[in-house]
Amino acid sequence: MAVSAPRQAGISAVASLPTAAGRAVLGVPRAVKDTITAAIPAGDLDARDTDYIRETLPGLWLLASRYFRADVDGLHHVPPEGPVLLVGNHSGGVVAPDLFVFVLAFSTYFGVERPFYQLAHNLVVAGPTGQLVRGYGTVAANTRNAELALKANAAVLVYPGGDHDVFRPSWQQEKVDFGGRKGYVRTALKLGVPIAPVVSIGSQETALFLTRGEGLARVTRADRLLRLKTLPFMLGLPFGLQPALFGHLPLPAKISVRVLPPIDLRERYGKDPDVAEIDRDIRAQMQDVLTSLAEDRRLPVIG
């Protein structure tokens, strides 16, 4: 089929984009991505401030234990020293009370001197509260930072499901869902560190999470620009129906956390382990515990 001259000229103009304006339009998404990337601090383990933790821990733990009636059990399973990869299911949106409850409980149990780092999304680390959470040892979630911390003999907390898990609809709160991500297994195998599963419930009751918004993330290119595979919506305080990325004032839901015995992957799975098998087994073990915790709850929020 022949193409008319005006249309043909238009196609050529778009294809070549010879003008500075045209190049600028195409460069906007890359500029946004570069700006966000530049704002993400490097994995500086020294940013963890033991004095800051020591000063703020008592008050924050009192608040968390009273407001969320936090119940954290099984910390005695964590090796008393040396590197360990703590692998958890994740709930509660951007606020993620399960993260804060566990970090505070871990720091109280083992003391602030034990090196402990948490892997978080880029937007958390680079956001307005980034400096505060970095004081507790929060670093951007990537393989490099995980390996740096583990090689420094630290305990490292990772949530493999990331935004896929933390923004799942509230009626799926009793499901462990890593979204097919298995990098945590490869990291543990590479460095020869044990995995200690961490199972929590309650954070997904701090608001009503409605949808992950994965299709919206693709359409708006947030999946590429912001590393966000989801653009979720929720019903919560103080704004009612809102994008979940804005955060929320969490309802005082009871949060329960269980730490399971550590797993020596080489000892259990041999010299040539199957990553998919390990991931499947760990999720199944966590799912059993999560189901049990759910059965013990009487009512949403009340616990």
Image (cartoon, grey):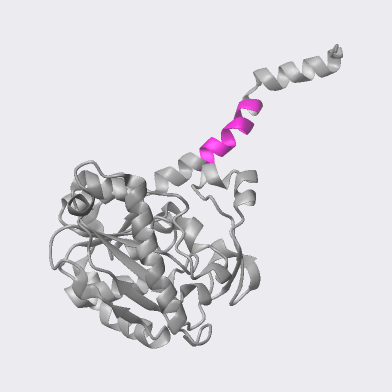
Q: Position of residue 195 (x, y in %)?
A: 25, 58
Residue 142 visible in the picture: no
Residue 222 vs 232, above or below: the answer is above
Q: Give, as a single range, the part of the protein colored magenta.
A: 22-32
Q: Position of residue 258 (x, y in %)?
A: 32, 74
Name the residue rendered at 41%, 78% in the picture.
293
In this rendering, position of residue 35 left or right of residue 244:
left
In this rendering, position of residue 159 left or right of residue 9:
left
Residue 272 visible in the picture: yes
Residue 160 vs 1, above or below: the answer is below
Q: Is 125 within the magenta?
A: no
Viewer-proximal residue among 150 and 76: 76
Q: Position of residue 76 (x, y in %)?
A: 19, 75
Name the residue rendered at 37%, 48% in the picture.
182
Q: Is 25 within the magenta?
A: yes
Q: Which image quarter is the N terminus in?
A: top right
Q: Main secondary structure of the magenta part?
A: helix
Q: Quadrant of residue 117?
A: bottom left
Q: Position of residue 221 (x, y in %)?
A: 59, 43
